[in-house]
Amino acid sequence: MIRVVLAEDQAMVRGALASLLGLEPDIDVVGEAASGEELLTLAEQVVPDIALLDIEMPGMDGITAAGKLRGRVPGCRVMILTTFGRPGYLRRAMEAGASAFLVKDSPARELAAAIRRVRAGERVIDPALAAAALSAGPNPLSPRERDVLAASVNGSTIADIATRLHLSAGTVRNYLSAAIQKTGARNRTEALQRAADQGWL
């Protein structure tokens, strides 16, 4: 049996996935989590073969959880299953050690097949997303530029961002200026949108 844990913050989606996978004769869903933190604790307890993670979860997101899971349960392979098929997310997930990256609109039978392939040591990536990631290139933003750009959401002022990130106002302006230039945007709102669309934040 392939032992699987699910991490998905939407209870209905999580329940549907568990029910679908439970119909497979060789897959056993041994635990469910609603957040990245909950997943890490659960995985240490049940030691699954596969962890199936959503990206967008409260607190710790799925990609961060994937990276931490490698250290805590080394034998567990990670699969990312997400609504957000963004090239930047794919790159970050692979860097975090994920073995698979699939979008949620894939047929259910493909998910079970992908779980078997990952258990056998293969890497499974949505083909259209892989092509998009290759054409998009790497994330041009530095970690600090990402932090400052992400902190500018909801119209935060330069002073707000500086206070939140413990930086000077001038440093915040410099990082924002670099992020705007690197994303080819006209202003920070547009830069934020472009970076979010690419999965760079």
Image: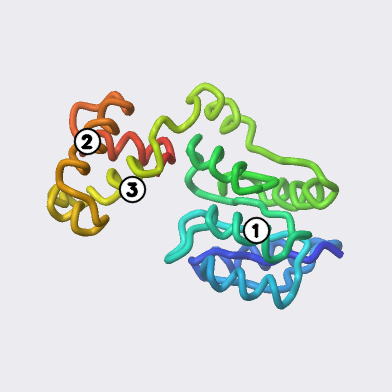
The x, y position of residue 20, in whole percent, is: 69, 62
Of the residues shown, which amino acid type is indicated by label 3? Asp
Circle 2 SS class: helix
Q: Residue at x 65, y 58 (%)?
A: 52
Circle 1 SS class: strand
Q: Which mark is residue 147?
A: 3
Residue 74, compared with residue 122, is above or below; it is below
Q: Quadrant of the C terminus?
A: top left
- Is the C-beta separation of discs 2 and 3 under 8 Å? no
Tag 1 or tag 2, which sits nearer the N-term?
Answer: 1
Q: Nearer the viewer, mark 2 or mark 1?
A: 2
Of the residues shown, which amino acid type is indicated by label 2? Asn
Residue 34, compared with residue 142, is above or below; it is below
Residue, disc 1 = 52
Measured Cα–Cα span from mark 2 to mark 3: 13 Å
Residue, disc 2 = 174
Measured Cα–Cα span from mark 2 to mark 1: 39 Å
